[in-house]
Amino acid sequence: MSAVYPENVRLTADGTAVRILDQTRLPGETVYLELKTPEELREAICALRVRGAPAIGIFAAYAIYVLCLHSGAADERQLRLFFARQKAELDSARPTAVNLRKMLDRMERVLDSAAGRPAAEILAALRQEAEQIQQEDIAMCRAISEHGLALVREGDGILTHCNAGALATSCYGTALGPLLLAAERGITLHAWCDETRPLLQGARLTSYELSRAGVDTTLICDNMASAVMQQGKIQACFVGCDRLAANGDAANKIGTSGVAILAAHYGVPFYVFCPTSTIDFSCPDGAHIPIELRDPAEIGRKYFEKPMAPEHVKCFNPAFDVTDHALITGIVTEKGVLRPPYVQCLAALLEGGKK
Ligand code: MRU
């Protein structure tokens, strides 16, 4: 991978802590943190120091390994009790991105299958699984980026919302992958980044990542998306996903469903980039996806020098919304692009995965 892509999650060289690039400090400062206590690790997820569905899953896998390493558990029974407590704590940090729970479940299955083995071997197996999860993510990013790039032509304008790039994964990202891959290959695409209120992932992270990689990048306020589509500047919308339900409904950053509705109005194809690790086959539809509610102060105060709303005004701050599957032109996975009807092709994907 080229050096322009940030390395956001890994174990420290001595393997005793998780090292992250603190995404809350970007784009102004590049600060790395080494985390090892339960409080530090959970706080990093809650505060979005590490964020983006795949990156949260990778981080959680390393985090639970590091916590087990320092647990001081005297035997396997104690380790199991400790694991269960820490898993519940980490899992409760953010509710919407399914990768967090799925990767913790994966780590738990390793613990279960290592039953009866010495503690050192169990720990080695946990570390190996966390590293495997990250390796799979890197391969996923490459494949999903190729599939996405095949959907556009040289010179196209791509609108994106929030950040689904290298910072949200361990390589090119998902929805930003085609743009980064195109830049590597000398293919010109034009990125239009919604700033993504209220936490500004589009401004702080997406425009940072894309411009550093040499992609022609233009930042817009969220409420300008309609105008740029109306002016014919956008040939496709590429967005990420935090949880895909079994019927194809897709939860992603708040505002994504509005982009999908605009895209349908203007006849612009709307693609959701969703690695298979982000599909929740146990969730029948979008109404069953838990939506994170965040601190109302993020709307009127955060990132402003002075409060931008009266103290007493109520604020409603859902961090995600659900895009109805009927608005999605294609779901891009690392295995290829799914087209409607999604219930059938997702069921086939699940069946295929069992073989
Ligand atoms: O609240 P965030 O910043 O974690 O939200 C992230 C997103 O909505 C991303 O689009 C999604 O996680 C996909 S990342 C490949």
Image (cartoon, grey):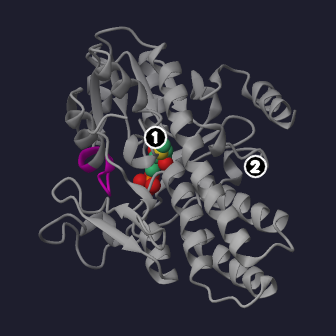
Residue 336 image offset from top left, x and y in percent: 63, 21
Is residue 31 visible to the viewer in this orientation of the structure? yes
Closest to the observer, 68 or 39: 68
The span picked out in magenta is 196-204
Q: Does the residue labelled 1 lie within 8 Å of ligand 1?
A: yes
Closest to the observer, 222 or 157: 157
Position above or below: 81 against 226:
below
Residue of label 2: 283
Q: Which of marks 1 and 2 is nearer the N terminus?
A: 1
Position above or below: 49 against 55:
below
On whether residue 21 falls in the magenta region, the answer is no
Number of the label disc, if any, that sits on residue 218: none
On whether residue 198 falls in the magenta region, the answer is yes
| Three-letter code for the amino acid on which mark 2 is drawn | Cys
Number of the label disc, if any, that sits on residue 256: 1
| Three-letter code for the amino acid on which mark 1 is drawn | Thr
Quadrant assignment, res 311: bottom left
Position above or below: 339 against 103:
above
Is residue 294 visible to the viewer in this orientation of the structure? no
Query: Residue drawn at (32%, 16%), measured in percent from left and top?
Result: 185
